[in-house]
Amino acid sequence: QVQLVESGGGLVQPGGSLRLSCAASGSIFKIDDMGWYRQAPGKQRELVAIINSGGSTNYADSVKGRFTISRDNAKNTVYLQMNSLKPEDTAVYYCNANYIRTDFRRGDRWGQGTQVTVSS
């Protein structure tokens, strides 16, 4: 079984910063892509940022220049550094990983979500 555990959400004022973490554990041989998605009330879940095992990244246009995704392959952990936060960044943030299990089957898993609220 593979689990993703997120941490780091909270309430922050506009212009502030937060750092999200997501640690994967379980029967993992290798993790390929790891990403952060978010879902605001009444809206669909959207991609925020994604990073592959080689470190290549892609970002939603709305967060480019403000958010940075990174990963520590030794710890099976992905991070999202969020700077210059805006009220429209308010959402539940979800971590996602697609991976190869120790039995060499592919898998895909979501974290439980962490609330980020940007408000004065």
Image (cartoon, helix red, strand yellow):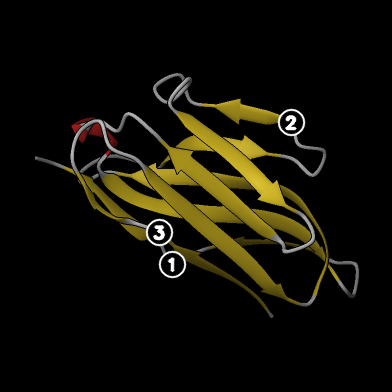
The three-letter code of the residue at mark 2 reads Ser
Pick whichever of labels 3 and 2 is earlier in the sequence: 3
Q: Which mark is residue 64?
A: none
Q: CA distance from mark 3 to mark 2?
A: 23 Å
Q: Quadrant of residue 56?
A: top right
Q: Which mark is residue 112?
A: 1
Quadrant placement of the N terminus: bottom right
Residue at (20%, 33%) from the top-left corner?
14
10 Å crowding of disc 2: few (<14), some (14-19), many (20+): few
Q: Which mark is residue 8?
A: 3
10 Å crowding of disc 3: few (<14), some (14-19), many (20+): some
Q: Can you name the residue that lies furthest to the front here?
A: 16
The three-letter code of the residue at mark 3 reads Gly
Pick whichever of labels 1 and 3 is earlier in the sequence: 3
Q: CA distance from mark 2 to mark 1?
A: 25 Å
Residue at (46%, 44%) from the top-left corner?
37
The three-letter code of the residue at mark 1 reads Gln
- Give the left or right position of residue 40, taking residue 22 as reference: left
Q: Position of residue 17 (x, y in %)?
A: 34, 40
Quadrant placement of the C terminus: top left
Q: Secondary structure at mark 2?
A: loop
- Give the left or right position of residue 20, taking residue 108 as reference: left
Q: Position of residue 98 (x, y in %)?
A: 70, 55
Pick whichever of labels 2 and 1 is earlier in the sequence: 2
- Give the left or right position of residue 47, taking residue 100 as reference: left
Disc 2 designates what residue?
56
Tell me whether circle 2 and circle 1 mark residues in contact (CB < 8 Å). Answer: no
Q: Nearer the viewer, mark 1 or mark 3?
A: 3
